[in-house]
Image (spheres, rainbow, N blue to C red):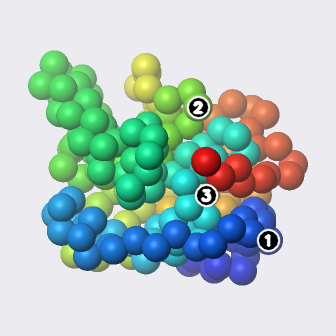
Amino acid sequence: MFNAESFRQVVAQPSRAATAVDWGVIESRMGVSLPSDYKWLVENYGPGSFGGFFYVFCPHSSRKGVDLECQYGRTNWALEYLTERGCSLPRRPAELLSFGRSENGDVAYWVMGRRDEPDRWSVALGEPRGPLWEEYDGGMVEWLEAVLSRRVRMNIFPKDFPRRVVCFNPLT
């Protein structure tokens, strides 16, 4: 379960002002409600990287590589493309919604069990040029905290990620 204070103990919250987002507009354009822990993270941390390696997609980012709606379109297209060409994926593309990526191109997805229950979605991580997928039975912020605190090891990520002290590096 997501705990804001617990997450802040792993990664200090940046001192800059919170990010304001009109979630109704974003969710309407995407056709899906988004998890509350994700909204908290975006509003309190904003666009940037965790440990200089993992980026969470944010609405209205000036950088397309981390813009939520732009990346949703790109990753959805890529999943459909792979499926049409006979590649085996652990989930149907319609069940996956991307929310972040690593510097190596690994993509993190929400696994949308029921689209109308976003706070119950779990996490999947897929490598960009290979068949390895890993799943975590919990929410996005819970997963990120577990990875950044080294309680959970994702085999897709490099062995040296994360470092002992993880910083959040805001994008400017």
Mark 2 element type: loop
Q: Mark 1 points at which residue?
A: 9
- Residue type, mark 2 in image: Glu
Q: Which residue, given by chain and number where applicable, does mark 2 sit on?
A: 103
Looking at the rendered structure, the secondary structure element under dot 3 is: helix
- The part of the image, by quadrant, that contains residue 142 is bottom right
Q: Name the residue under label 3.
A: 144
Amino acid at the residue labelled 1:
Gln
From the viewer's perspective, tell me whether residue 56 is left or right of residue 80: right
Residue 64 placement, left or right of 134? left
Residue 68 visible, this angle: yes
Image marks 1 and 2: residues in contact by CB distance under 8 Å = no
Q: Residue at x 58, y 31 (%)?
A: 103
Relative to 42, 49 lies left or right: right
**C-alpha span from label 3 to label 1:** 13 Å
Residue 99 in sight here? no
Q: Residue furthest left?
A: 84
**Is 134 placed above or below 12 here?**
above
- The nearer-to-camera label among 3 and 2 is 2
**Disc on the earlier residue, 3 or 1:** 1
Task: Identify which residue, 81 or 90, lies in the foreground.
Answer: 81
Q: Residue 46: x and y, percent?
A: 56, 61
Residue 143 lies, in percent from the top left, at 58, 60
